[in-house]
Amino acid sequence: MTIDMSKFLDTFFEESAEGLDAMESGLLHMQDGAADDELVNTIFRAAHSIKGGSATFGLSEVAEFTHHMETLLDEVRAGKRAVASDLVDVLLESVDCLRAMLAASKSGSAGDPKRAKSLSARMAKILGVATGHVVVTASAQPVQAASGGWRIVFRPHAHLYRTGNDPVRMLRELAELGEYKVSCDTSRLPGFVNAQPEECALSWTVELRGEIPEKRVREVFDWVDGDCDLTLEPLPASSEKLAPDAPAVQAVVPVAKEKTNGDKTSTPAAPAAAETTSIRVGIDKVDALINMVGELVITQSMLGQVGKDFDMSRVEKLMHGLAQLERNTRELQESVMRIRMMPISFAFQRFPRMVRDLSQKLNKKIELRMSGEQTELDKTVMEKIGDPLVHLVRNSVDHGIEMPDVRRAAGKAETGIVTLNAFHQGGNIVIEIKDDGAGLPRGKIIAKARKQGLLGADEEPDDNKVFELIFMAGFSTADQVSDVSGRGVGMDVVRKNIKALGGTVDVKSESGKGSTFTIRLPLTLAILDGQLVSVGEQTYIVPLVSIVETLQMKKEAISAIAGRAELYRLRDEYIPVLRLYGLFGIEPRQKDLANGLLVVVEGEGKRVGLFVDDLQNQQQVVIKSLESNFKRVPGVSGATILGDGTVALILDVSGVIDASRQATAPSGLGKNQAQIRAA
Amino acid sequence: MSTAQAVRMANEAAGSDSDNFQVSANSDQYLTFILNGEEYGVDILRVQEIKGWDSATPIPNTPDYVRGVINLRGTIVPIIDLRARFGLERVPYGPTTVVIVLKVMHGNASRIMGIVVDAVSEVYNVSQQDLKPAPEFGGAVRVDFVKGLATVDKKMVIILAIDELLNSDAMAVANAE
């Protein structure tokens, strides 16, 4: 029986990534001068588990490299070494290097051994200088010398089993002492015909690493003293391979699990997608779920009893039971959704490091402030919001915050402040990225837009329109393209990604005071607050978030252009009227605008009025995919199942607006877009 | 629901060693149905269930042979009217009109779709050598939708290639991704 190690390998990679994140954030805190014991311990523990894990899976380079880090950290932990910035730098770089090494082994490609080697050398140098005594060389040797290990050749006599001893138990005990590699020698096996099941013909060679006293190792074999041949040799260096006397063909023996460790574990067939497929759920959330299911069962049995011999006198009881069922169901639904929710700190945690590196590179002084890290949002949303956030933060650091001397001249503190804030608002999560820098260069944007033909020469756009421009593809005002930003790809991608999640992004900016980007996202992608509207026989669902208002039209406010494009005057605004039945090709009950209702919706900053027959109720609907069994349908974002079991389609408001625009003659706006695409 | 029973029996037969239905290596079982007086067959292992016709929610801007989507125990399943798909004359849906829910493969992925037919008929064993290739008949039904022609009890049964049929035209999966 062999154990499929690749299954555990994935877990190892996942855990290592978490460990590295912990190390990184710990190191960043350490840099702030707060090197308390707990912090150092956290970092040390993370490094230690990565070392242990990588050795288990035969990733010897990773293990060796982590070992150097561990040695360095151990000295910090023991108080032998002060936390200096060069130390933190080296360790941070090592974290990066380790991450790259792990990624390389995950994908099965070769890593960058040079980088690891140079970092190892740097660490060794730091070690050598500070401990005060001369260390032999700056290679891998010195750190290993302190913690060699043992090569144990364990050759039990044939009668070992009869004494009641089990070699597997001893090998397990050895495994607990330190890093451990074992190989089994089967050359003494007599062959199947002559096999004596009661006799032991196997012997083992164990390589045990770590600072383990000889006495401790011998203790393991105390019980079999005299029943076996035991040789112990100290191990000097780390790179030495398994004992040569281990035969090439290794039989599968009861210690198969341990034996596999020595073998090079196969890399997983395909590297997993960037999005992790497992989540860790707090036990409290699971407990809440179990409680709720318990209540549901109670309610169900109560209802069953009511229904058994039902008469009108029990109606009240039935209603009561149904109300309880509704409450249970809602709570259960909320708890299940909460399982997918994770605090946004998972997305935020990469920023301290990023801002630190960027500010060093750009010679700016920047302080990053984060708040609302505990705000929870859906895991899928979080995974997809990561990249847009990185982009916006980079932008704030690069374009927003000025150089220290510029800031001083402007009467501001030299250190710029970038603030990340997250909070819940209604059914949305709002993420703000704020900087106190120069603000968006309004004049520059306008000039550039004129040059690219996005704006007319004498057009004087308002702020909203100007800031809208920065989200256009290929638009950048940076004088110089740096490797940080300025290529003009990005803001359009940011907006596209956020839109794909059903969110919006807004900009506010004040010259000289800074700018704020506000991202609004739905909490979850699985449930939606909807307004049910009817058109003819059909029921459609309009997402509540996109509805501005609903009204009955007055005849005198309806007008038309060229008899086709109908407009409705709402206060001081003309809103195009879109007859939903015409767009969807169904027979309505109302064709006269004055008899139906107008649902004013907003999508992508444009407002249109959807003409429908009637409004029904508002309710939460579970979004079901149309694509899984059919395909994407323009103007429809999905489907749901109503209370009566029928299917209703959910409108995609921006899709409907697009579709209506294509149906009518190409307007000025459409042409404009075509130009952008061509540019 | 004798037809549903037939399917269940056939499915059981495919899974077990029933005596009534001899399943050999080179013989497949087909569920046949009637469409405009002709008998068509589909691979029975692809049949998920047979259900009576119930109204579907129409999908805007799709050809009229896409009747809409129905709720099949929480899954949204599109329904294709096979008469309309083959350009046959529309008839009102009657008591024998049924929806055959099929598993349609495209590449490694699968989709669940329903087809509306006049009535279900039989379950036949057809050996592979009895399956004759369809001649070019230049009619409404494209030859690539036909897997072959079989003769059972001196009647012709048109065996449909449902993957080709239900992944074509408006039902095609966008291959952009």
Image (cartoon, helix red, strand yellow):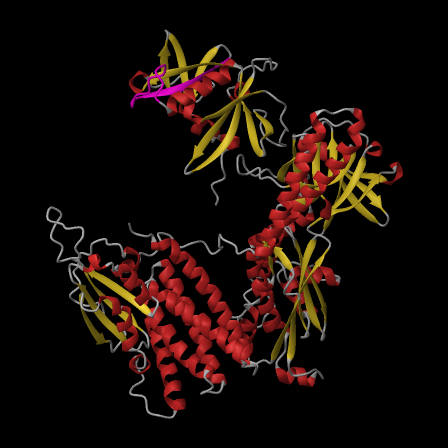
- Could you tell me residue B27's position as x and y percent? 32, 20
Position of residue A335 measured from the top left corner of the image (x, y, whole percent): 63, 49
Residue A149: percent from left, percent from top: 28, 75
From this view, report whether residue A578 is shown above or below residue A166: above
Instruction: Identify the residue shown where x is 21% and y is 57%.
Output: A161
Give whichever of B92, B126 is nearer the camera: B126
Instruction: Decide if residue A80 is on the left or right side of residue A340.
Output: left
Which residue lies most toward the front here? A163
Residue at 50% x, 18% y: name it.
B4
| A547 lies above or below A412 | above
Residue A480 can be seen in this image: no
Q: Which of A126 and A507 is in front in this view?
A: A126
Give the total of numbered labels.
0
The answer to whether residue A65 is magenta is no
Q: In the picture provided, is A517 more to the left or to the right than B115?
A: right
Q: What is the quadrant of residue A652 in the picture? A: top right
Question: Where in the figure is residue A569, as x and y percent of width and height?
Answer: 84, 44
Residue at 58% over, 39% down: A625
Q: Which of A428 and A203 is in front in this view?
A: A203
Q: Seen from this angle, which residue lies furthest top? A: B154
Corner quadrant of residue A227:
bottom left
Asked if the magenta segment contains residue B23, the reply would be yes
* Residue A77 vs residue A546, the one in the foreground: A77
Whether residue A183 is visible: yes
**Which of the 4 image quadrants contains residue A408?**
bottom right
Query: Looking at the image, is A171 positioned above or below residue A412?
Result: above
Magenta residues, start to end: B17-35
Q: Residue drawn at (58%, 15%), measured in percent from left and top?
A: B90
